[in-house]
Amino acid sequence: MSLQLNLEKSQAALQLCLAKAGIVTPPKVDLAFVLDVSGSFEDEHRAGITGQLLTRLVPWGLTFDPDQQLEVFTFSSGPQSAHAVGAVNAANYLGYVEKHIVALVPGWGGGTDYAPVLESVLRSFGWLPAAPASGMLGRVLAQFCGRPQKLPENAPGRPTLVIFVTDGENSDAARTLEVLRASQQRRDAVYFLFLGISNQGSRFPFLARLGQEFANTAFLPIPHLARFVSQDDTALNQALLGEELLAWLRGV
């Protein structure tokens, strides 16, 4: 079921929440919404509940993003599933997940790997170089133009908030740690907010580890998504705006 918001009211509530935390002028930050489309998460997508979560974040795009939108990515298992779906904004958010994601994106109903989509997001916002071309074209470019170079520290990317939504543990823990560790070492101006969704009381030890290990990463468990998205604006924003994220927003 699609959810329609009074976007002006919801945006004002977010700005008030930020002002109370000392952020009177919200910084300009690109927003990415990353959605797990593995098989175990299908029921929540088809029921429209993840779509309601995306809707509740539209005011965040209006408030923070220079283009007043969120860039949506989906993933399941393997690099081929990491997919840039498009931008969600005030004009197109109604039914976005149902219209553009359910049974339509690459990897729909697959397993769960975090690293490929994390790298895709970092690439999209300028924190990693573009992926090299494959096949003969890639070999020719490598010969005449050189291999893609590693980005230097403080590479010129755009400050980015990544809201990463998943319902399960991944199969590529070691590679995910490598990607996040490299991002931290480059001092990317990126903050990762991992939301662990479970209606069955599942725990997320790996996501909890990420939240503890990296200064620019937080983990928020959401045991009942339908209840979470039914909260009023103030309660929902307070749940998402942890002290660490607020400190990051003050510093960008």
Image (tube, grey):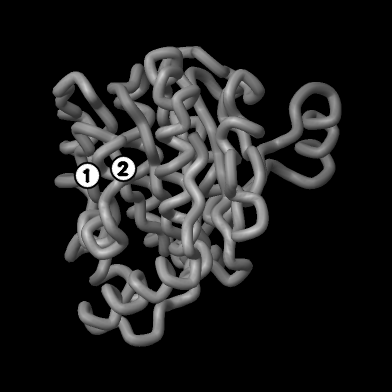
Q: Quadrant of the C terminus?
A: bottom left
Extreme residue toward the bottom, this view = 24
- Residue at image position (31%, 61%) is 233
Whole-percent x, y for residue 219 in the image: 23, 44
Amino acid on which disc 2 is placed: Phe
Task: Give x and y (percent) for residue 37.
Answer: 48, 24
Number of numbered discs on residues: 2
Q: Identify the image quadrant of residue 194.
A: top left
Q: Are marks 1 and 2 in contact (CB under 8 Å)?
A: yes
Label 1 is placed on what type of residue?
A: Leu
Q: Is residue 227 above or below residue 39?
A: below
Give the quarter of the image for residue 189. Answer: bottom left
In the image, is 173 to the left or to the right of 244? right
**Location of residue 249 with respect to 165 vertically, above or below:** below
Dot label at residue 194: 2
At label 1, counting other C-alpha atoms closer than 10 Å, the crowd grade (few under 14, some 14-19, many 20 or more) is some
User: What secondary structure is found at the residue carrying circle 1?
Assistant: strand
Q: Which mark is residue 220?
A: 1
The residue lying at 47 percent from left, 31 percent from top is: 48
Residue 183 position in % (x across, y down): 40, 50
Horizontally, residue 180 falls left or right of residue 29, namely left
Rendered location of residue 70, percent (x, y): 55, 55
